[in-house]
Amino acid sequence: MSPPDEHDSPGVEIERKFLVGELPGDLGRYESDHIDQGYVAIGDDGVEVRLRRRGDRTLLTVKSGPGPVRVEEEMPIEERRFETLWPLTEGRRVIKTRYLVPLGSDLVVELDVYAGDLDGLLTAEIEFPSEQASAAFEPPGWLGPEITGDERYANQSLALRGPPPPSES
C-alpha cells in the first residue's frame, strides 16, 4: 500500500475539469439533480461563498480559488435561511442539471448540463482520492479538452460573465 498523499484529508478536493465533447448515450439512466447555485461573495483571490440548492438540500459553501487542489467546506442550512440569502445572489447565478456518470470502479464524472444564459455548455469534473490517481487518469473519448484551473470555466466566472466565446474555448 502506498503512503497517503499529503493532500488526502477532509476539506481538500483533488479534481480535474473538462469540456464535454459528446454526451454519453442514454444520459437519463444516470442519477441526476437540478442545481440552483448563486454567489453571495467572491473575493479578488477567487475565494467564494455560495448558496446551492441541489434537489431538496440547501447548502452554504466556502471554497478557495481555482486549481486542481482546493479547500472546500460545505454546510447544510435551513430552507428558510437559503430563501433569505438567495436574493443576495441576483446576477451571480448558475442553473444546471448534474448527472453522476460512473467511470470504472472507483471514479464518478459529475457531468453538468447548463441551462438559462449558459444553455449549451457541457462540463465534467472528476474528483480523485489522491494526486497520484489524478495524474494517472486517462480521460474517456467523450470528454473534450481539459480546462482544469481555467478560470473562465469556474462556476463563479460563468455566473458573473457567462461562457467564454467559442473562439476562446
Image (cartoon, rainbow, N blue to C red):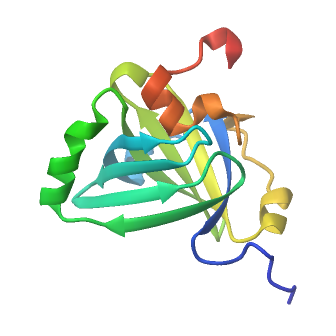
> Picture coordinates of residue 30 (x, y %)?
42, 53
Q: Quadrant of residue 76?
A: bottom left
Q: Residue at x 36, y 68 (%)?
A: 75
Q: Residue at x 15, y 49 (%)?
A: 84
Q: Is residue 26 visible?
A: no
Farthest-out residue, front: 44
Number of on-image labels: 0
Drawn side of residue 24 relative to residue 2, left or right: left
Q: Residue at x 26, y 39 (%)?
A: 88
Residue 105 vs 79, above or below: the answer is below
Q: Residue at x 38, y 41 (%)?
A: 39
Q: Is residue 62 visible?
A: yes
Q: Locate the N terminus and report the quarter of the image it occupies.
A: bottom right
Viewer-proximal residue among 139 and 11: 11
Residue 44 vs 98, above or below: the answer is above
> Picture coordinates of residue 13 (x, y %)?
63, 63
Drawn side of residue 26 relative to residue 54, left or right: right
Q: Locate the C terminus and report the quarter of the image it occupies.
A: top right
> Picture coordinates of residue 129 (x, y %)?
69, 71
Drawn side of residue 141 relative to residue 127, left or right: right
> Picture coordinates of residue 54 (x, y %)?
31, 54
Farthest-out residue, left: 80
Viewer-proximal residue among 112 and 58: 58
